[in-house]
Amino acid sequence: MAKRVFDILPPEKLKEEALEKEKPKFKLPEIRLGKKLIFLPSIIFIVLISLFLLSFKFSKAEIKIWPETETPAFKTRLTAETKVENPDFKNNILPGKIFEIEKTFSEEFSSSGKSLKKAEGIIRLYNASTTKDETWLAGTRFVSSDGKLFKSKDKIFVPGAKIKNEKIVPSFVDVPVVAAEGGSDYNIGPSHFSILAFKGTPRYYKFYGESFQPMTGGGEVSQVKKEDLERAENILIEKAKGELKEILKKEIPSDFVFLADASEIKILDKFSLARPGEEIEKFNFQLRAKMSTISFKKEDSEKLVDELILSQIEKGKSIFKESLKMEYLPEIINFELGKINISLNFSVKIYPEIDSQSLKRALIGKSLAETKIFLENQPQIIRTEIHLFPFWLKNIPKDVEKIEIDYPIID
């Protein structure tokens, strides 16, 4: 039979174990760092290293340079001819083209003249003198009871009086009359009239007139003057000049030079129903006009100017074409020959040429301060701007391909 073995602890050990079981159990919390926190320093380090390395790969310098400029003025003459097909820069001759436009202009104008219109009316002429028919001349004068003189407009056929019961029965005829003078004073009402030619004779009382309606139409009226017609024509000509120039400007292709002062206007027709002396307040005037001009291509004139400028400026200078200013002054225009002579004034900014590659090589590796000093000491440079990328770079890259020079900058 196998023996059983028991471990017997000393009394002190047993006591300690009992006390240990009676103590409350406290456990400190565990502090765990997440995986992101554990790797954050590593990520930041990698990013910084990457940026540092990329800054070398993608670094660049941008340099803007304003050169010293001058603006010389030039003057020459050129000729544009419609019979020429190709530019002759040696003789300053350019191909020309005639452009034409026609239009009719019409407008209403006011008469400036004034006249006194004569009053008119009807007088019934009575014959109590004779039984014979009579014919009186046109212009027979009638005087109203208040002294206003009127004249017959036509011949008067006066019928003879009738005899009835041994008494004379007056005959009568209606006579159109017009006042001897103009003015509203002759717009009189119904009145009695005597025949002026018979004054002092027995017939004066046997022939008499009477009106039953007022005389009308007398007074001031507008009248067309010769000067009104001339003024209307001149106004329409000026209107035609302005409008036809604007139409031509739009009709001519944009690549052609339009010279407003190199145009000619012709009046093809003019017409008005009004005549000098006509008593009307307003009248219409109409004319038809044609405008012609000789033009030439901008490209041809600019090439001509380029050659002239390059032939006169120093070597090592360049033209800033955006600054070119040209003034065309037409001198002689002959539309029959299709030819125009022009005085041409022009100016342009010129600047010194630089060797960008040599300048880039001279700036390689220089600090920002050294670069500024170097550029400012160049006699033909008046201003510069330098930008380095990324921003923390302090020196120009050592790779020429990473240096960009913007030249020239001309304000």
Image (cartoon, rainbow, N blue to C red):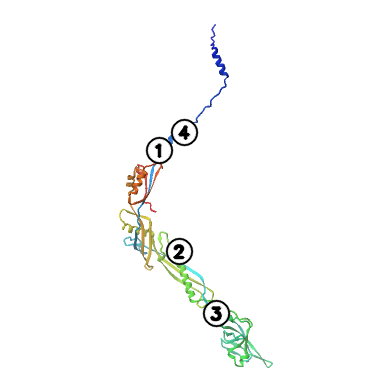
Disc 1 marks a residue whose amino acid type is Phe
Q: Is residue 220 above or below residue 397?
A: below
Disc 2 marks a residue whose amino acid type is Glu
In this rendering, does residue 375 appear at all?
yes
The residue identified by callout 4 is: 40
First in residue order: circle 1 vs circle 4: 4
* Res. 134 image quadrant: bottom right
State left or right for residue 234 relative to residue 364.
right
Residue 243: percent from left, percent from top: 46, 65
The residue identified by callout 3 is: 116
Disc 4 marks a residue whose amino acid type is Leu
Q: Of helix, strand and loop, which one carries label 3? A: strand
The residue identified by callout 1 is: 52
Q: CA distance from mark 2 to mark 4?
A: 74 Å
Disc 3 marks a residue whose amino acid type is Leu
Q: Nearer the viewer, mark 3 or mark 1?
A: 1
Q: Is residue 265 above or below residue 195?
A: above
Residue 317, numbered circle: none
The residue identified by callout 2 is: 246
Q: Of helix, strand and loop, which one carries label 1? A: helix
First in residue order: circle 3 vs circle 2: 3
Q: How many marks?
A: 4
State left or right for residue 51 relative to residue 154.
left
The front one of 320 and 249 is 320
Q: CA distance from mark 4 to mark 3?
A: 111 Å
Within 10 angstroms of label 1, few (less than 14), some, or many (20 or more) residues? few
Q: Nearer the viewer, mark 2 or mark 4?
A: 4
Within 10 angstroms of label 3, few (less than 14), some, or many (20 or more) residues? some
Residue 346: percent from left, percent from top: 36, 60
First in residue order: circle 4 vs circle 3: 4
